[in-house]
Amino acid sequence: MKIYRLKSEDSRSITAYGSEGAEITPILRSTTACHVAQLKLSAGGSVGFHPAVGEQVFLVLEGEGWVEGETGERVAVRSGEAAYWTNGENHQSGSNKGLTALLIEGEELIVRFSLEEGDS
């Protein structure tokens, strides 16, 4: 067994697409085109509108915020909830109070979360 720790020196700020108050820490990358990272948004932080590189799951671990897809509808998300975007889908995210999310990006992801009523 090995124990790993997320260290601040492994993080980098996200500034592309007009992003503010966003920090990402890579966690793992697979040889089959899948990678996982931790995203931290400070209060008022956001990651600007951009296309998803592969399928993407945005799982909120702590805090609350919002996500938006190509429809332009902003949807509130909180700890335990996840957004899913398809490959190439334009999207953005942000938080008024701050949040920590796990980002999972890859190909042919099989999402096993339950959908909220009315979602497709």
Image (cartoon, helix red, strand yellow):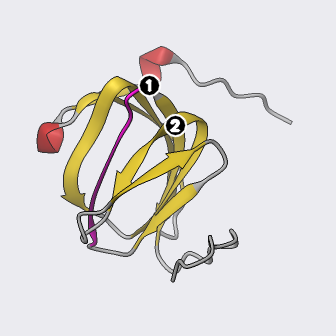
* Mark 1 Cα shell of 10 Å, populated few (<14), some (14-19), many (≥20): few
Q: Position of residue 82 (x, y in %)?
A: 56, 57
Q: Position of residue 116 (x, y in %)?
A: 62, 70
The dot on residue 18 is none
- Give the residue type that dot 1 points to: Lys
Rendered residue at 29%/36% (across/down): 46
Residue linked to disc 2:
64
The image quarter containing residue 63 is top right
Q: Please check the rendered image and state whether residue 91 is part of the magenta-colored stretch, yes or no.
A: yes
Magenta span: 89-96
Q: Position of residue 39 (x, y in %)?
A: 45, 37
Front-lying residue, 2 or 77? 77
Q: Are marks 2 and 1 in contact (CB under 8 Å)?
A: yes
Report if residue 27 is visible in the image: no
- Give the residue type that dot 2 points to: Glu
Residue linked to disc 1:
97
Rendered residue at 18%/33% (across/down): 15
Front-lying residue, 52 or 10? 52
CA distance for labels 2 and 1: 7 Å
Q: Is residue 74 left or right of residue 51?
A: right
Q: Is residue 73 above or below residue 109?
A: above
